Amino acid sequence: MSHEQPARSANPSARSLPEPHYWESLALGDCLVTTGLTITEAHLLTWAGLTGDVVSFHLDAEYAASTQFGHRVAHGPLTLSTSLGLVTQTGYFGNVVAWLGLDSVRAKKPVFIGDTIRVRATIREARETSNPAHGVWVIDYVTSNQHGDVVMTFTSSFLVRRA
């Protein structure tokens, strides 16, 4: 398997590739802040179809109206996966060798259709490994809605290629 980057075009108007980020690119305390994503009905329906999580609380507007929240609520794992994806879009994860796991997941508040979520991801730990080719990032994720309310927190770890 080749790990070579595609050649850059000699055409100055061509879109350039982002600089590769390695383990050394982030250190303890560094923070990545994402753009927002508005959760839509399509997200809930697609997640339910992909995962089989077809609970009325998420999909049945009439039933959800009778619950304590009064509206359909996004699936917790959908919020978690979307949070991971938003942080991945920052461009720092192109040299991830492996996802090592997830810890301390907490759903703090519901996410509703129409809510826009953003993530603040802070490097809790950036440690070397016994293999000099890799390092580990342990990252604390805080996902908030458009009002600044924290809706989810968790920690995720990655094995990352070193420069």
Image: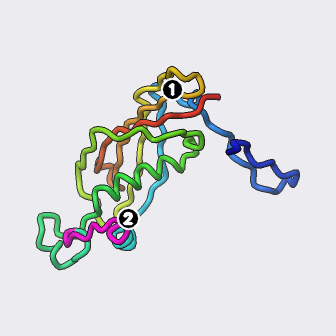
Based on the picture, tell me whether residue 52 belongs to the magenta stretch.
Answer: yes
How many callouts does the rendering have? 2
Residue 148, image x, y percentages: 33, 49
Q: Residue furthest right?
A: 10
Residue 17 inside the magenta-drawn segment:
no
User: Residue 30, percent across and down?
Assistant: 48, 30
Residue 79 located left or right of residue 35: left
Left or right of residue 45, residue 4 in this image: right
C-beta proximity under 8 Å, tags 1 and 2: no
Q: Residue at x 32, y 69 (%)?
A: 48
Residue under the point 46% across and 25% down: 28
The label number, if any, that marks residue 121 in the structure image: none
Residue 103 position within the rendered picture, expressed as x and y whole percent measured from the top left? 31, 38
Predominant SS along the magenta part: helix
Numbered disc 1: secondary structure: loop
Residue at disc 2, secondary structure = loop
Query: Which numbered disc, 1 or 2, marks the residue that appears first in the sequence?
Result: 1
Q: Which residue is disc 1 drawn over?
A: 27
Where does label 2 land, which residue?
39
Give the magenta-colored segment's residue range.
Answer: 47-57
Residue at image location 72% in from the left, 48% down from the top: 17
Q: Residue furthest front?
A: 1
Say left or right for 163 vs 136.
Answer: right
- Which residue reaches farthest bottom? 62
Which residue is at 38% across, 68% downward?
Answer: 50
Q: Compare residues 123 and 104 and report the one nearer the observer.
A: 104
Residue type at numbered disc 1: Ala
Local packing at callout 2 (Cα closer than 10 Å; few below 14, some 14-19, many 20+) is some
